Amino acid sequence: MKTIEEKLKVLSKIAESFNKAHIHWAVGGSLLLYLKGITDRFNDIDLLIYNDHAGKARELMTELGQMRILDRNCYRAEHFYIFDVDEVEVDIMGDYYVPKNGMEERIALEKDADIEWMHLGSQMVPLDSIPMWRRHYDVMGRQGKVDMIDRAIV
């Protein structure tokens, strides 16, 4: 398992590449919770990509690491890719749909998303919103993550 510092170095490398290419992207998942001080650990890097930029993001990621072949994905997605970059898993997600209560809930990065920018070394990293990820986790049935966010924002 890579250290947090090694994982953040990978994030910085991706930020440099995506920002140069003007990719509309944002950090989500447990890494977002880590960067916002809600948790003290994360396993991988989850990045939401604006759907129209997902192809370019995939191309840039193949320059940084190796794309995994997915046997199957539990979500219906136009763009869902997993890469290994310096032995760190990076999940790239465009629009995807999560089955819930007989319907499909859309999870996506919108052009008008409430993005917060933070410095990571010499790079600027966009963060998706915590309320949006609370909703995403709720849709995905990840109650432990929902509870963690609720405790942090009280």
Image (spheres, rainbow, N blue to C red):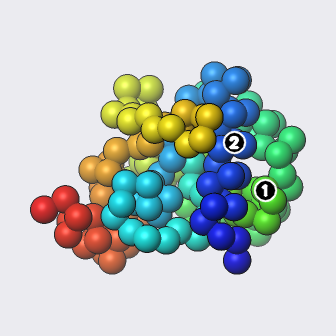
**Residue matched to label 2:** 14
x, y percent for residue 13:
72, 43
Q: Is residue 96 above or below residue 117?
A: below
Q: Which residue is mark 1?
A: 85
Sequence order check: which comes first, mark 2 or mark 1? Answer: 2
Name the spot of residue 120 as percent of width and height, x first: 56, 42
Count residues near mark 2 (Cα–Cα under 10 Å), then give few for <14, some for 14-19, many for 20+: many
Q: Which residue is located at x 78 percent, y 56 percent?
A: 85
| Distance from the alpha carbon under mark 2 to that under mark 1 | 9 Å
Q: Do tag 2 and tag 1 residues touch (Cβ < 8 Å)?
A: yes
- The image quadrant where one finds the N terminus is bottom right
Q: Secondary structure at mark 2?
A: helix
Element at badge 1? strand
- In this rendering, the count of numbered labels is 2
The residue that appears at 60% across and 41% down in the rendered structure is: 121
Query: Image quadrant of residue 153?
Result: bottom left
Task: Work out whether residue 87 or residue 109 is closer to the camera in this orientation and state it.
Answer: 87
